[in-house]
């Protein structure tokens, strides 16, 4: 029996050629997209996907063309949160993503599975599937990037799964990343883990700018209007300063946002005057400024 080391070449599969072709298609697909922004966090439970959905909605409500990609293969939730239901249309050019109520183009593996069905990869046995599951997930994510007819976009928001282990894969997929937005809550544990994510993103991602958002910063009582802290940690501004990243703002907790998002309804459209909605719009503005400043700095470096 031959071992791996006895095999010369790729057995005629032309793997390198296939990868090169996928990279070419990826570059063509991303060419009409002005800025790609990743939303990430090393800690689960910080409301990262909810922030991604509302950030995309806020940008769309400003009149921008926005796409939203759910990069969490196993914990996809963007379809549920945006309320899109119909199966994507296919054409010779690729897959046409459905639009949310405010016009955000949405793509997720959830669009291709039955409701509540987990993602399971076919294998002779699941016992040893971990050895190749990451590669299959990477291939699925690459296909969602390259096969989606995004068209001309001002922003493509990429909602990453929690943790830092997927960042190297994203670096391979997206050599042109305008910004990475890191989400935390004001707790000691969250800030401790998120700090690692910031450092990992800086080391691995070819990103022009890094920004930090503090989610669930406090709770505004709907009856008395008083503000109450939900966590007892350090000010997230200190975390941003420690790692020299831009602090983009704080978003208070609003049960209405959770209730509407759970049902795929648009929070900003329903309660645009609420403190959390106002904060989300301000974060969207801060993200636009962050990307613009990074582009200006890049242009200055090129012209020198």
Image (cartoon, helix red, strand yellow):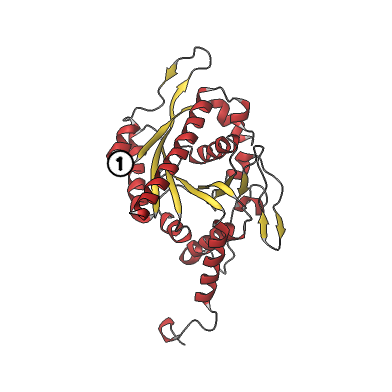
Q: Quadrant of residue 144?
A: bottom right
Going by the image, does 237 lie left or right of 79?
left
Please determine whether, in this image, residue 80 is positioned above or below residue 148.
above
Q: Position of residue 183 (x, y in %)?
A: 42, 39
Residue at the outermost front position:
303
In the picture of the structure, the residue carrying the numbered disc 1 is 244
Q: Position of residue 159 (x, y in %)?
A: 51, 46
Closest to the observer: 204 or 254?
204
Figure label count: 1
- Residue 293 visible in the snapshot: yes
Going by the image, does 293 lie left or right of 28?
left
- Residue 129 visible in the snapshot: no
Q: Position of residue 113 (x, y in %)?
A: 66, 53
Please determine whether, in this image, residue 136 is positioned above or below residue 73.
below
Going by the image, does 7 lie left or right of 87?
left
Quarter that holds the C terminus = bottom left
Going by the image, does 205 lie left or right of 113?
left
> Which residue shows up at 48% across the image and 28% down it?
279
> Which residue shows up at 66% across the image and 60% down it?
94
Closest to the observer: 231 or 122?
231
> Which residue shows up at 64% across the image and 33% down it?
265
Label 1 environment density (alpha carbons within 10 Å; few <14, some 14–19, many ≥20): few
Closest to the observer: 235 or 29?
29
Residue at the outermost top position:
224
Q: Position of residue 195 (x, y in %)?
A: 33, 43
Q: Quadrant of residue 140?
A: bottom right
């Amino acid at each position: 029996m031959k071992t791996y080391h006895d095999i010369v070449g790729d057995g005629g599969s032309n793997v390198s050629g296939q990868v090169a072709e996928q990279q070419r298609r990826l570059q063509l697909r991303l060419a009409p997209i002005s800025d790609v922004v990743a939303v990430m966090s090393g800690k689960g439970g910080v409301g990262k996907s909810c922030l991604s959905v509302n950030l995309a909605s806020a940008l769309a409500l400003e009149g921008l063309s926005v796409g939203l990609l759910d990069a969490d293969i196993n914990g996809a939730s963007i379809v549920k949160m945006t309320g899109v239901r119909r199966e994507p249309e296919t054409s010779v050019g690729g897959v046409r993503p459905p639009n949310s109520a405010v016009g955000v183009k949405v793509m997720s593996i959830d669009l291709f599975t039955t409701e509540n069905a987990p993602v399971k990869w076919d294998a002779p046995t699941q016992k040893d599937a971990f050895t190749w599951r990451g590669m299959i997930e990477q291939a699925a994510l690459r296909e969602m990037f390259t096969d989606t007819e995004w068209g001309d976009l001002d922003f493509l928001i990429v909602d990453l799964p929690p943790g830092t282990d997927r960042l190297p894969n994203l670096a391979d997929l997206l050599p042109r990343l305008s910004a990475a937005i890191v989400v935390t809550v004001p707790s000691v544990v969250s800030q401790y883990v998120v700090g690692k994510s910031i450092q990992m993103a800086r080391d691995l991602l070819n990103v022009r700018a890094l920004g930090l958002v503090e989610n669930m910063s406090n709770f505004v009582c709907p009856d008395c209007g008083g503000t109450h802290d939900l966590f007892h940690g350090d000010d997230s501004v200190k975390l941003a300063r420690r790692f020299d990243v831009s602090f983009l703002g704080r978003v208070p907790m609003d049960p209405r946002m959770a209730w509407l998002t759970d049902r795929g309804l648009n929070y900003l459209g329903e309660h645009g005057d609420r403190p959390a909605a106002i904060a989300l719009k301000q974060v969207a503005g801060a993200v636009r400024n962050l990307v613009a400043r990074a582009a200006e700095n890049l242009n200055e470096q090129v012209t020198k």
